[in-house]
């Protein structure tokens, strides 16, 4: 799979699956702020990846 690939689906599941298939050992993610209401109702991909990741996650903003 090339880095230019587009994979459809729920971001958290797609990212986790890609990490496992590609044997990745560090996840680097950018962050940005959502409104508190949106964050409470929907959550964020970054927060979900932090909770579920089995590898180190480096965040930058």
Image (cartoon, grey):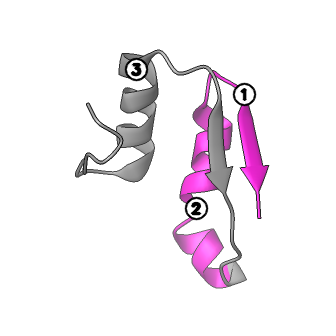
Q: Residue at x 69, y 63 (%)?
A: 31
Residue 49 within the segment the image draws in magenta: yes
Q: CA distance from mark 1 to mark 2?
A: 18 Å
Q: Nearer the viewer, mark 1 or mark 2?
A: 1
- Disc 3 marks which residue? 22
What is the magenta range? Answer: 37-61
Q: Secondary structure at mark 3?
A: helix
Say above or below: 19 vs 4.
above
| Left or right side of 16 for 34 | right
The disc placed on residue 56 is 1
Q: Residue furthest top?
A: 23
Q: Earlier in the sequence, mark 1 or mark 2?
A: 2
Rendered location of residue 17, percent (x, y): 37, 29
Question: Which residue is pictured at 61% across the width and 20% down the height?
Answer: 25
Determine the secondary structure under disc 2: loop
Q: Give me the residue at 65% from left, 79% from top.
A: 34
Residue 2 in view: yes
Q: Quarter-wise, where is residue 52 in the image? A: top right
Judge whether 23 appears above or below 39 on screen: above
Question: How far from the left and from the top, in percent, is residue 3?
Answer: 36, 41
Kindly indicate the quadrant of the structure image that contains residue 40.
bottom right
């Amino acid at each position: 799979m090339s880095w230019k690939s587009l994979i459809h689906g729920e971001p958290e599941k797609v990212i986790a699956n890609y990490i496992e298939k590609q044997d990745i050992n560090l996840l680097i993610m950018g962050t940005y702020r959502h409104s508190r209401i949106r964050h409470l109702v929907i959550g964020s991909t970054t927060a979900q990846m932090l909770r579920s990741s089995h590898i180190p996650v480096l965040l930058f903003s």
